[in-house]
Image: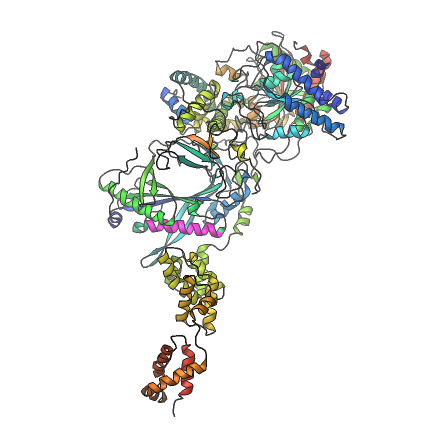
Amino acid sequence: MADLTREQVAHLAQLARLDLSPDELDHYNEQLNVILAAVAQVGEVAARDVPATSHPIVMTNVFRPDEVRPGLSREDALSGAPAAQDDRFRVPRILEEEPS
Amino acid sequence: MTADITRLSAATLAAELAGKQMSSVEATQACLDRIAEVDPQLHAFLYVDAEGALATAASVDRRRDAGEELPALAGVPIALKDVMAMRGVPTTVGSKILENWRPPYDATVVSRLREVGLPVLGKTNMDEFAMGSSTEYSAYGPTRNPWDHDRIPGGSGGGSAAAVAGFEAPLAIGTDTGGSIRQPAAVTGTVGVKPTYGAVSRYGLVALASSLDQAGPCARSVMDAALLHEVIAGHDPRDSTSLPGPVPDVVKAARTADVRGLKVGLVKELNGPGYQAGVRQRFSEVVELLTALGADVREVSCPNFTYALGAYYLILPSEASSNLARFDGMRYGIRLGDDGEANVEEVMARTREGGFGPEVKRRIMLGTYALSSGYYDEFYGQAQKVRTLVQRDFAAAFADCDVLISPTCPTTAFPIGEKVDDPLAMYLNDIATIPVNLAGNGALSMPIGLAPEDGLPVGLQVIAPPRLDDRLYNVGAAVEAALEDRWGHPLIEEAPQ
Amino acid sequence: MNTKVTPALVPYDDAVARYEPTLGLEVHVELGTASKMFCGCPTAFGAPANTQVCPVCLALPGSLPVVNATAVESTIRMGLALNCTIVENCRFARKNYFYPDMPKDYQISQYDEPIAIDGYLDVEVPTSDGVETVRVEIERVHMEEDTGKLTHTGGATGRIHGADYSLVDYNRAGIPLVEIVTKIVPGTGALAPEVGKAYVSQLRDLMRSLGVSDVRMEQGSLRCDANVSLAPPDGPLGTRSETKNVNSLRSVERALRYEIRRQAAVLDAGEKVKQETRHFNEDDGSTSPGRSKEEAEDYRYFPEPDLMPVSAQPEWVEELRATLPELPAAHRKRLQSEWGISDFDMQSVINAGALELVEATVAAGVSQAAARKWWMGELAREANDRGVGLSELPVTIDHIVRVEDLISSGALNDKLARKVFEGILAGEGDADEVVAGRKLELVSDDGALLAAIDEAIANMPEVVAKIQSGKQQAAGAIIGAVMKATKGQADAGRVRALLLERLPAEG
């Protein structure tokens, strides 16, 4: 497995919304490669026909009835907001349109 | 007088409260006094809610005085890992990004504590977002091990373990994603149980890795852990992964404490040269003890456990990278770099950059990579297959055994600072606890003595098949009784004061 | 900076003469469940901001989703109505991307295991010479959740660009959404925009008949993304554009028509169509570029660990199938055969948007011919003049029933009935009030009629002679004179009867 490049690390940081400093990029680049080399051992297992397990204990059709339950008051809903205005959460200007 | 109260077990406290030999306010005040005395050194707590705890205690006392029949643990104080949302009480998850966040709701575990009437003393320290094995990754400074203040109390739930080991609280709530209840219990000489996945509701537990996280009890004895387990376990319709059906009778199992005829499997892959000599020594003594108690001990092999650590450090970061996305500074928590010029994307990235510590960022990056297109099959997909193989290993082992045992961790508590910059070395601490989280079984850690070379506690891990958590308490209580007979007192009594 | 460059357009007929359009439609339907997809918050439209939220749909740390059973059942019913295979084991997945209207910064959706796949909808497309049926194949139907609502504040336009900041209301976040994705629809030629419109329209009717959604495009409970690409005849598929959130039936058609003309111009110039999302501008019917898809988003889908898989056991699916109502296509066929009318007449009713009204009017006891006559005649013209839908006119089914009663009792004739409707449309009250107000009652007093008949007989002796020699058809002239004398308020049948009594044929 090829090592992660610094460019890839920068792309990951962008995907993960982490404004890493150049020093951090170098640091994580190095550490991620060490960790990846270690975890890559999972690739040694011949598991082509093994099903994946996403839940340790699988149940199916865990549903709730379509009933309205009390939620939060608006005060509680907005209580943690770093910025609010007109009963809404205020967020900085958005440049990109929503992906689809 | 108060010093004595803090040394009582939860079971004894409960009995004295029920018999009105003591009030809950007295018990709670004693814990608060003890916290005031020792916590400046230990730093087990991130927040102490004296007012809230005493109010609960007073209410329980009033109800008891009015002749109301109360549940066993009513009035027994407890500490809560800061990963659990509690209405109106700061919940930081050990992270700067949630500094001063006060949830407008209660976790289901907290609701149950409230219903039964356990005064919550406060929120305990933890590795940031439960990522770590030493509590050194807390944004609010490390917690110290009551056995040796220069050593780590384990992690991520080092605060809960230290609070119990340091006699600040008779009980605590922990959460365990790869060992975060069991490893701190092992290195602080206390008892910690990770119930079967789904036994305790995750609603209100700030998620690290959804398919691995499980809350459980921290205590100084197996019976105390069982009493708390009984309070917090049970089906919750708010958690889709919550197990339906009745909770096994863990208290009865802790009373039974009988391993005669029990088939105990010793997992070959979870012991060996990588384990500290004193750990191996205490562990083999317990194997002899179990045999002497009438158990049928045999070795079993779980070959795929070798790959469990790799699978875990792919699955956990992957799920975590997604679970932690919501911490973006828009709806709660801190917001950084919003200077009126920066756009939302920049503010999110600045908030996360400044709000998360290095280990969290490391794992988010790792998880983002493992899930990214082109790498999914190689990493996340393959890890989920290894998970299946680990489950199959367990199933095969449990075909021949009632429980499995191993040391809880390879070493005793290591010095603060030793592994903080070496993530791989830190990860290796979880080597024996991780397979259980991958497969979903319940497991318990309990003290089995001190390692001769450093005088620090060693933990035994007992693993049961999924849903059969009562077996953990039966075996744990039997071993505990036999060891305490030998020692003449609980091991925790030997902790320096 | 918001410079808008209007691209060159090729006349539509030229565009479709040179290139073959291929359609693709993605429709999002907001389900009309009482509570949200993963929590118990209500879904009512238009509630005050952030009053229908809870820890789950605000994504407070620690909260967990639980699936709404009715949402799953509705989706399975939708899949069945679209002739899909219901997948026996499916699951939810997380679609990871950061956006401030999405509280978790991931959307719970379905990825490689949707609940329903491989269906179709036979769409009846009106053409100049009748109706063409086009089979639109469905690729998948899957469940997901809606996002919150952003209000862009500051700046000039209230749009995303140039705003100083945005405000978020999470009431809509977590409302169940079902996404219906078609396979590519090739071979529709010049009809492509009509096919797109008819598909969305008939899909909407289908959802409405299932009762799963109120499908109000203007409120966003049905949203359409219209994709189209062009290719030279027999050439490989072209690059498509995706026009987002086209929010009326007419807009679907206009957007597709515009995109076909625009892409043709791009191709004519020897350039490549960019893969991008585009926005539809209602004002001038144009589209403008949105997000470029060149740097593909990496959504890092993975199975949602907080939710268990869904197992659609055959018995459950059959139970749900049994709850399907008569679907619109079958319903239309049945009505047409009950009414005994031609394909053309039926399609006229459908095209006029009068099907439901005609059906209800017939159900209220009026003959199908009369019901069609009224709704499709004066009333349709009036609605058209006013630019409103038929159901928005002040005329109700009750009015038509009453007018028909008056006709059959002989109190009104057709001509007077039209005047009654005129009065109702003018706001003069109900049928009886208009009749009274305008004095439209037929003259039913035989004495008055006989007086008028006698006068006419006296004035037209030659006509009288014809009638008396057996030529009854000559009576028309006298009847006409009587009608004129009574200002149309006579029952022509009665006049004829009285006249023939008066003048029995000789011999």
- Nearer to us in this view, B457 or C372: C372
Question: Quadrant location of residue C235?
Answer: top left
What percent of the width, then of the height, locates residue C330? 45, 57
- Name the quarter where the C terminus of chain A is drawn: top left
What percent of the width, then of the height, locates residue C141? 45, 43
Task: List the single residue furthest toward the left.
Answer: C269
- Nearer to us in this view, C430 or B326: C430
Query: In the figure, A56 relative to B172: above or below?
Result: below
Number of numbered discs visible in the structure rendering? 0
- Picture residue at 35% right of the left edge, 58% below the top: C385
Position of C237 with respect to B223 (left or right) is left
The residue stretch that appears in magenta: C193-209
Position of A3 with respect to B15 (left or right) is left
Query: Mainly helix, strand or loop, the magenta region?
Result: helix
What percent of the width, then of the height, locates residue C168? 45, 34
- Nearer to us in this view, C114 or B284: C114
Question: What colour scheme was applied to this rendering of the protein?
Answer: rainbow
Position of C78 with respect to B26 (left or right) is left
Task: List the single residue furthest toward the bottom.
Answer: C507
Residue C116 in magenta stretch: no
Task: List the single residue furthest toward the front.
Answer: C437
Q: Is residue B382 visible?
A: no
Question: Quadrant location of residue A36?
Answer: top left
Query: In the figure, B150 relative to B219: above or below?
Result: above
Residue C208 in magenta stretch: yes
What percent of the width, then of the height, locates residue B73? 70, 25
- Name the quarter where the N terminus of chain A is drawn: top left
Q: Is residue B107 visible?
A: yes
